[in-house]
Image (tube, rainbow, N blue to C red):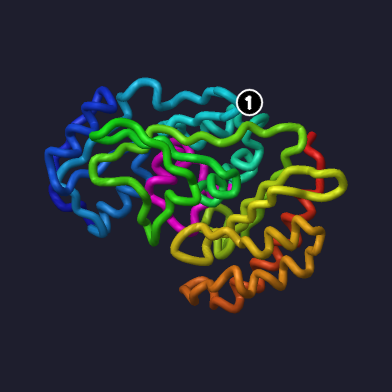
Amino acid sequence: MKPAPFAYTKARSLDEAIGLLGTRSEARLLAGGQSLLATLNMRLSAPRLLVDINGIPSLDRIDRKDGMLEIGALVRHAQAERSRDIAEHAPLIALALPHIAHPAIRNRGTIGGSLAFADPAAELPACLLALGGEVEIAGAKGKRTVKADDFFKGLFETALGAQDVLSAIRIPAAAAQTRVGFAEFARRRGDYAIVGLAASARADGKGLADVRLAYFGVGATPIRAKKAEDALASGKLEEAIAALSSDLDPPDDIQATGKVKKHLAGVLLKRVALQLAEKRA
């Protein structure tokens, strides 16, 4: 299929992009386009204007500031895979990146685009949630910051407004005590996950503290399993797995029934718990 007709323009600054979004009631941003172009071709979306933000400087930078790692919205997945800063200071994201689609898509797809699209089966939204990160949003009234826990609102729905641009994300830079884990089940390498789990914690003596378990593929948004987090922090893995029965209520879909997804969530928790117990190299 071919997309519905649309106008195209290229923004040279954040302010220009925000202004252009305000000129049409149905305008969309174009970054990597790896999700947007597919929805255009299938006519699942039909914007009247595409605003290309690839020419905006400074949105493709990775910087460490005040104990946080800041990743610009236009950082490509492939760029992030090669980044020493992400490998050292955001090891959870480094673990997740190879699971995202295929190299051709990672060469174009962007960190900001993945988060703004907010597919509930995608890896990066769950990683941001597991890390307790935050999103920087530029809008008509200036910039604001939204915590990951408040950013994902519903199926493909976020805290972004019609004139908002996701400009960067920030996550706490990993420390010596940081522990992370990641695992997913997919039918084929590169497919969206049937169920996935991104996790972070802090080593506390022989146990764990500040455990955050973010599941994806089990609901309309990435979901924290908070009762399982508490149980795992207490060193009770079997109780944590049992707690998933109340933390998660995955719907049936074309890939698996909710019952199967819940079982797989427990299997993933066992695997990720082993990763969390390991000291970072």
What residue range appears in magenta?
99-123
Image coords of residue 133 (percent x, y): 53, 41
Residue at image coords 57%, 70%: 248
Question: Seen in the image, is 2 located left or right of residue 76?
Answer: left
Q: Quadrant of residue 264?
A: bottom right
Magenta includes 3? no
Image coords of residue 118 (percent x, y): 42, 52
Magenta includes 101? yes
Residue at image coords 57%, 58%: 224
- Residue toward you, 11 or 254: 11
- Residue toward you, 215 or 99: 215
Majority SS type along the magenta span: helix
101 vs 258: above or below: above
Question: Seen in the image, is 234 located left or right of residue 261?
Answer: right
Residue at image coords 24%, 31%: 17
Residue at label 1?
A: 84
Question: Seen in the image, is 10 located left or right of residue 184?
Answer: left
Image coords of residue 238 (percent x, y): 78, 69
Q: Amino acid at mark 1?
A: Arg
Residue at image coords 70%, 45%: 180
Classify 10 Å Cα crowding around label 1: few (below 14), some (14-19), many (20 and above).
few
For the N terminus, the quadrant is bottom left
Q: Is residue 81 visible?
A: yes
